[in-house]
Every structure is written in C-alpha cells, then in structure tokens.
Amino acid sequence: MIDELARDCLPESSDRRDGLAARGAWAILMSHPLREDLSTVVSPSDSAAEQHSSSRSPSPGASTPLPTHQLGDLLRRPASERAREYRYRFGQSVVFGLPVVALQIWGSGLGGREAGKWVGVFQALLAGWVIYVAAAGMLFEGVFLLPRRLSADLVCALITVAIYLLSSLRLVHVLSGGGTARPMFHFVVLIMATWSGVRWCQYAHCCGRGAADV
C-alpha cells in the first residue's frame, strides 16, 4: 500500500508526460472548427524546394520562339542596302585585285627562276580574299534563289570560283615543278571588280530614281 501511494505521489516519467501532451494537442487540433486536411499541408521547406525547381526548369511552353522569315527578309532587302553591298565588293575587288594584275604583268621580272612560284602564291592569297568578300555572298544568295530562278550573280560567282580552282591547280603544278601553265588569278579579280561595279551602278540608279519619284 505504501509503495502504491509513493508511486502515485511521485511525478510522472517524461515518456508518459510526452504521450499525454501529444494526445492533448491532437484532440485540440481535431476539435478546432477551422482545421485543414493534414494531407494537403505542405512544409515550408517542401514549398521552397518546389519553387526553386520550377524556377530552374521552366516549362517548354515558356521558351522564347525562334524568329522566322529571317531568310525571306534577307532576300527582300531594299535596293539601297544592295547598292551598299556591291559598293563594298567593288572596293575590295579593286584594292586587292590591282596587286594581282600588277603581279601578272610585271611579276616575272621581279626575281629569278623562282619568281613564278612566289607570284602565284601571292596572287592566290589576294584573289582568295576577293572570292571570300565578293563572290561568297552572291553564291550563297544565288543558291537560295535557285528553286525559283537562276540569278545572274550566281552565274558570275560560279565562273569566278571555277577560274580560281583551275588556277589553284595550275599553281600546284608550278610549285611541284611539273607544269609551266601560269595561273589565271587576275581574271578572277577583273571579273569580280567589273561585275560588282556594274551592279553597284544599277542599284544606285534605282535608289536615285526612287528618291526622285517620292
């Protein structure tokens, strides 16, 4: 009897007190009129992680669409812009083409037996730059216009590229000592300078006539 009275008088153990407190809190929560469904409760850490993942991985529909009709706008650019392009091609063809023509005329008298090789190398470099800045753009645009029509720029670019490739083959034979035919790089720069100058004048005339009409 004394032992039972002593156990009743002694304080409850910590485990027992924790269990009673948990049951009391649960009863208060379930009896509250504004209780929410516990299955829908999300912890702050889970919501923060979800927001972070959504910001790191946007939905496919939110991606920025790629611009369209850029190629069509490029092919339909105004005459003033085309005149500026041909003026630039004409200037590059003249600046880098005059040394090619000069080397073709006076290059053989600038050195000894190796003069032809070095003349061909310098001509190939200068004419290659003219091909890059003048013929490449006309070739690119002509290829895209080919399904609809055959442009004169494409024909001119193909002729100059073919002459450049043939001259390069001749230069290889000259450098190897197995050929005597001289390259024809001067034709490349002459054709490109003449064609670019003519087209520049045509588009400049169109721009001037359009400004006069306005």
Image (cartoon, grey):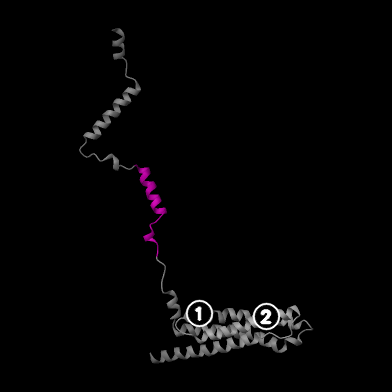
- What is the C-alpha distance between the residues marked 1 and 2? 25 Å
Vertical relation: 190 (above or below) 33: below
* First along the sequence among labels 1 and 2: 1
Rendered residue at 63%/87% (across/down) = 187
Neighbor class of circle 1 (other Cα within 10 Å; few <14, some 14-19, many 20+) is: some
Q: Quadrant of the C terminus?
A: bottom left
On the rendered structure, is 134 left or right of 23? Answer: right
Vertical relation: 1 (above or below) 211: above
Rendered residue at 49%/90% (across/down) = 202
Vertical relation: 7 (above or below) 206: above
Rendered residue at 70%/79% (across/down) = 172
Marks 1 and 2 in Cβ contact (< 8 Å):
no
Q: Which mark is residue 169?
A: 2
Quadrant in the rendering for residue 90: bottom right
Rendered residue at 42%/53% (across/down) = 56
Between 86 and 136, the residue placed more toward the observer is: 136
Question: What is the secondary structure assignment of the residue under circle 2?
Answer: helix
Question: What is the secondary structure assignment of the residue under circle 1?
Answer: helix
The answer to if 34 sits in the magenta stretch is no
Q: Which mark is residue 143?
A: 1
Quadrant in the rendering for residue 92: bottom right
Query: Mark 2 belongs to which amino acid?
Result: Leu
The magenta stretch is: 43-64
Q: Position of residue 68 (x, y in %)?
A: 41, 72
Query: Mark 1 belongs to which amino acid?
Result: Val
